[in-house]
Image: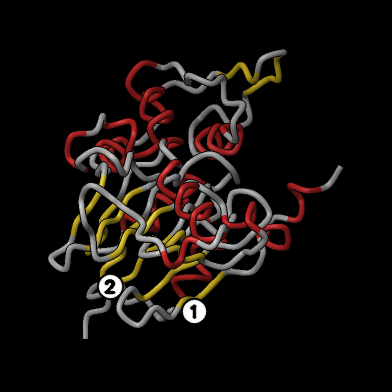
Amino acid sequence: MKRIFVMGDIHGAFKALNQCLERSGFDYENDILISLGDITDGFPEVYECVEELLKIKNLIPIKGNHDDWFMEFINTDFHPYYWTYGGKGTLISYLEHSEKKGKYFATGSGYKTSLDSKDIPQRHKDFFNNQLLYHIDEKNRCFIHAGFDRNIPFYDQRKEVYYWNRQLWLDAVEQKESGGEKVKFNIATKFREIYIGHSPTTRFGTNKPMKRYNIINMDTGAGHSGKLTIMDIDSKFFWQSDSVTELYAENYRD
């Protein structure tokens, strides 16, 4: 029987990705995986993450804000934030798989590198070019990286809102935790469920998925000090990797 899974922000944590796929018993040929974006920027195995995701026959890839930054580099040879927001891991990963291994230098504002967009394999360029802003399934479940403005019809929003705007989640947390469970949480466009990433649950005191109203936050901190999570969206059972602080202990040494 085909299962449908959703996965939070990966951020180059290939070891965590492998653990989640193995522990959930994911079937690469039959199951569906909805990736909520931010494959890039974090740990230095972005290349390996993309390669693994490309093996999945039924992959639905959502664009994250970090993926959008990397797309800007692919299209212009310029990374908009000088590789400083976790981009060093992406930089190292692609340098390791090019003929320019290890050629980058720290500067006052980030990193100077010999990496060019032509060093990125075409299949990887296609992967990032084909990421979606959102996915709405036949059961009216919404999958999106960051969120959206709940006061505006969903399809009327600027595209960057879908992978940047945290306000939907922050409003839901604030209202729920201030006793708002008895007050309707209004959203202009109604969805059965909304799955998001982008706002690590570790900032709210947990490394597990969080639910507020019909919004499920799947970013359990794999880009920081938490874990990567994959969930069966029908059963709501989820599996997690080990902590990235254990999997990538070398990244946390002084």
Nearer to us in this view, 241 or 155: 155
Q: CA distance from mark 1 to mark 2?
A: 15 Å
Above or below residue 215? Residue 148 is: above
Q: Residue at coordinates 33% horizontally, 41% vertically from top-left?
A: 148
Q: Residue at coordinates 41% horizontally, 17% vertically from top-left?
A: 77
Question: How many numbered tags mark residues here?
Answer: 2
Nearer to us in this view, 180 or 124: 180
Identify the image quadrant of the C terminus.
top right
Residue identifier under label 1: 23
Q: In the image, residue 46 lies at what x, y percent?
A: 49, 45
Q: In the image, residue 50 lies at what x, y percent?
A: 40, 49
Q: Residues within 10 Å of mark 1 (few under 14, many from 20)?
A: few
Identify the image quadrant of the N terminus.
bottom left
Residue identifier under label 2: 4
Q: In the image, residue 22 lies at what x, y percent?
A: 47, 76
Q: Residue at coordinates 58% horizontally, 43% vertically from top-left?
A: 42
- Precedes in sequence: disc 1 or disc 2: 2
Nearer to us in this view, 6 or 98: 6
Q: How is the image coloured?
A: secondary structure
- Determine whether the residue tagged by mark 1 lies in a helix, strand or loop: helix
Q: Residues within 10 Å of mark 2 (few under 14, many from 20)?
A: some
Using residue 214 as the reference point, say whether residue 19 is left or right of it. Answer: right
Above or below residue 99? Residue 204 is: below
Nearer the observer, disc 1 or disc 2?
A: 2
Residue type, label 1: Arg
